[in-house]
Image (cartoon, helix red, strand yellow):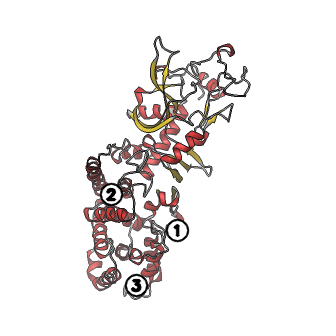
Amino acid sequence: MSSARQSNRSWRDDLVEAVNRLSSDVREPFGVDHALRVEHCVQDILEEPEHKTSAPMDEIALTAAALLHEAGLVHRKHHWSDDGLEHLGEGVGLSREILHHNEAFEGHPARVERVLGLIAHHNDTVYAFPSKRRGGAPARAKGESATEGIQTELSILREADGRVHVGTAEIAASIKTWQDQGVPYFAEQGPPLNSWMWHESVAANIRLTAKRAVVDAQTDASRDYALAAYDRLEALIEDACERDAVPYEQEICRPAFREDSVARMKGSSFWLRIDVFRGWDSLEEELRSCTLRDDASIHPYEAARVRSEIAEINELSPLALYVLENRLDEVLELHDALMVQYCCGLWDLPGWMQFRYNAPERQAIAPPLVEEYTEAKAFAHPRRVAGLVDGLHRCKAARRTGVRQIRVLVASDVPYPLVPLPATWPDVQVVRKRNYRYNSLEEFPDISELSKVEINEENFRYFFYRDLGKLGSLGERTFREFDEIRAGKA
């Protein structure tokens, strides 16, 4: 590699000069200095043991892409979107013109296209995350088919760029840029340190920048560097929390735990895409719009107090007496897939999202729902409990992996009783579905002033059942599932 660089000094110097000219008249944090740092990081990565025995690659094209990958940023146009997605196309156009006059690329159209492909896709990981500026949708889906033939060089470029972006100079420049754009340091509502969506807060952006470096790290050295950078940037966020008197919340699904998910998913192929992520406002709105299953005119959470918090799983009261083994596996697999691809896990979900996993059908999922209320019937004396209305499989799966906390949506002051009586975690086994609050129609209270729906033998037991389909809940477990469990088939 060194001989190739020495014999082509002139073409490289020409590219450096071209980048310098592009950024000389523009106040842009990612100009020639950033390009040189990424190029240097590429060279470091190529010296790692993982790459010394790898298949041959076009190092000239890779070096050129490292120098030119952010060329489009310095020519920002007023009509561009806030997240600047258009800089990729602009960079491709500028780079094509620059390469056309460079001696290493004259007469080598395939090499030129190789560089342009690297530039066009080097930010695919960044734009795969949802963006608040796009209504919670990602800016673009990953274009795997468009990267055929350049996967090795592309992974190295992404790795180097992600690693450099968590450096001191780049992160300081990024924070200033975000604040200049009006992004609040902390989310204005809901969890203050979200990290699922770009531009919800500066704190979230910092975490996402670190997570991007973790996801794109292919070598041990880059992985260690990215994990250390995450810890360093977390300290920065914690200091800001102390400065602004904002409660600091450490992530449950920290990048250090991603390797556990990588190990569990080893040998498994999957396809995952977040279609849209909705933050706190949307989550609260959807919850308040939920109805009772048998009377859509009743909205149990309409006037409830609602908040998001990290809960101790053992302090939650299950409201069902069994779980399905296959659903536990499915929940853990989805969690692991999210950690592998996004470095975000289900135990930390601060909003609700729609996604596709190994199928074209769109699914939805929200944080587990907990109702705080005073239970009088299940105990000798009234007791305050936190009933786990939805998310039992997630809590159980989290406990299996040694996780003791989970982010939940908490509703209190709900004026309608729950269908089941609370249970304890040792009760959750393959026995029966629930301890029902009302075991006969005669026990059911008179609600004629509340609802016009006729209460009968078919609906009395589940009349107060919350319909959480809008939040992605799969709903009531069926008797067929229950029978299969008892028969040892599920």
- Residue 285, given in percent of the width and then of the height, sits at 55, 44
Q: CA distance from mark 1 to mark 2?
A: 24 Å
Decide: is 29 above or below 25.
Answer: above
Say which amino acid is labelled 2.
Thr
Q: Is residue 260 left or right of residue 416?
A: left
Badge 1 marks a residue whose secondary structure is helix
Which residue carries the number 1 mark? 146
Say which amino acid is labelled 3.
Ile
Which quadrant holds the C terminus? top right
User: How many residues crowd mark 3 within 10 Å: few (<14), some (14–19), many (20+)?
Assistant: some
Residue at 50 percent across and 47 percent down: it is 281
Which residue carries the number 3 mark? 98
Task: Name the disc covering residue 219, or none.
Answer: 2
Q: Is residue 286 left or right of residue 175?
A: right
Badge 2 marks a residue whose secondary structure is loop
- Residue 29, given in percent of the width and then of the height, sits at 32, 71
Q: Quadrant of residue 459?
A: top right
- The mark that comes first in sequence, 3 or 1, is 3
Residue at 48 percent across and 72 percent down: it is 80
Which quadrant holds the N terminus? bottom left
Decide: is 150 above or below 25.
Answer: above
Q: CA distance from mark 3 to mark 1?
A: 22 Å
- Tags 3 and 1 in contact by the CB under 8 Å rule? no
- The mark that comes first in sequence, 1 or 2, is 1
Mark 2, mark 3: which one is toward the viewer? 3
Badge 3 marks a residue whose secondary structure is helix
The answer to whether residue 266 of the structure is visible from this angle is: no
The answer to whether residue 358 of the structure is visible from this angle is: yes
Say which amino acid is labelled 1.
Ala
